[in-house]
Image: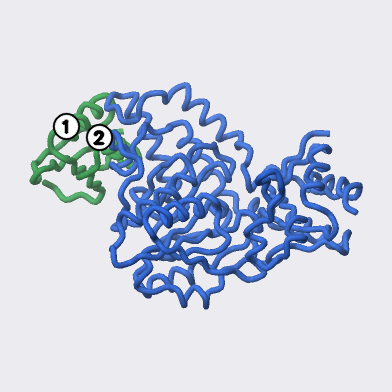
Chain colours: A green, B blue
Amino acid sequence: MREVEEKIDLRGIPCPRNTAKALMFLEALDDGAESLIIIDDGEPLNNFLESLEIETGYIIQEKEQNGNAWNLLVLKEG
Amino acid sequence: MKPIYLDNAASTPLMEEVKIAMIEAMNECFANSSSIHTPGVQAIKKVEKARHSIANSLNASPEEFYFTSGGTESNNWVLKSAVMNRDLKRKKIVTSAIEHPSIMAPLKWVQENFGIEVLKVGVDASGKIKLAELAQVLNEDVFLCTLMHVNNEVGSVQPIEEVSRLCARHAIPLHVDACQSFIKLPLDLRMVELTYLTINAHKLHGPKGIGALYMRKGHELPPLMLGGGHEMNFRSGTLNVPAIIGFGKAVALQQKMPEQIHEMSQQLKWLGDELKNNYSHCRINGSEVDRAPHILNVHFKGNLGKDIFWALNKAGIAVSTSSACSSNKMTPSHVLAAMGMEDEANLEALRISIGLQTKREDLEILIHELKGIIK
């Protein structure tokens, strides 16, 4: 996965606080920014992806398993 | 005459912006912030924004703050859970002689129920802890030191940086009750090595029923409230979202108001000087210089505090006495007694505490009314 400057590690943070923190993190980025979100596998990942679908302007460019978590490379389209 | 409220150390009126944010939250953020649907996520996002505001104001990480129902709960949490969590070889808690009842009562409880020894360090005539005495009692038998930052009756400011250094020498966690000082006095948690911090909202023009406990990373205490695992399993109970939003708003607004907070201390200095100039028998209880910006404690020789209190109340001015009504009679303040004040002067004490809403005209009216009351 490509190296990016902006990242947030949400491993160990329960739902829905992890989703809230991820969305707040994405909202604070500039348009066009790429960022890495690391989130636990299972319900945390599913819940975040479901919530992100409702938000507009974000594209998951890459997705890679990282042990018991997932690395998501997200583009903020703006 | 419009009522004048000068009891802001007890509680403060809501800031208008806080009220608006809370009403909006009550209308729109009613979902349970633990729910994963969109309204739930919207609610928890606002909670996290408030947590960020609070953490930023203290230069700490948001993950180190846990919302509670207020200062009393945060204080109870630390004291009771520290007993459960302690190294069993350590059997003592160190505190000061002038703490708030929400510290004194749980300390009495752990003393009676767990055989914990509570050592109360004295204060000087200005209400400051005696550091030499404190240094003598801190040793490897102590598992917690708990100290208020600003005293709620006289406004004395404790030297928590020095205290934190003394505690660190013996690896003793330090808990600070900052309910009276939060936002009013600067505090940087990256610079001051304290372990736990109690804060609340209603002393800073935020809502009642909401507070927080800061626990430094790596020093988390077992929860007091068990249930659904809210707040990272540390404090169960459905989050009071509107109150948390109000708390965050009050903090964010006042962080941008250092001039107004400085102005409060100027107002209070002016009031103290006027009272001393008008009444030769007026004394300021506690330090005149090293004091919180909002609390002035005075006594007028030969005048009972409760008599002045009721006379001012009739005139529409709310203040406070330091003494308390217990078993149908007035009992002297334990704070003023610890500062060496005799019972007679102790019962004469009157606390005047101002807020952001207090105007110079309010204090001028107070002085005018006192002229007809003070003997």
Could you classify mark 1 by the number of other residues whose Cα lies within 10 Å: few (under 14), some (14-19), or many (20 or more)? few
Residue A15, numbered circle:
2
In the rendered view, would you say B61 is above or below B210?
Answer: below
The chain letter under disc 1 is: A
Who is closer to the viewer here, B28 or A23? Answer: B28
Residue drawn at x 57%, y 31% as measured from the top left: B19
In the picture, the quarter occupied by the N terminus of chain B is top right
In the rendered view, would you say B315 is above or below B193?
Answer: above
Query: Looking at the rendering, which quadrant does residue B28 occupy?
Result: top left
Residue drawn at x 16%, y 51% as measured from the top left: A3
Q: Which residue is identified by label 1?
A: A43
Between discs 1 and 2, the one toward the N terminus: 2
Q: Tell me which amino acid carries mark 1.
A: Glu
Residue B145 vs residue B303: left or right?
A: left
- On the image, the x and y values in percent for residue B168 come to 38, 71
In the rendered view, would you say B200 is above or below A46?
Answer: below
Q: Tell me which amino acid carries mark 2.
A: Cys
- On the image, the x and y values in percent for residue B174 come to 42, 63
Query: Looking at the rendering, which quadrant does residue B303 occupy?
Result: bottom right
Could you classify mark 2 by the number of other residues whose Cα lies within 10 Å: few (under 14), some (14-19), or many (20 or more)? many
Q: CA distance from mark 1 to mark 2?
A: 8 Å
- On the image, the x and y values in percent for residue B202 come to 56, 41
The chain letter under disc 2 is: A
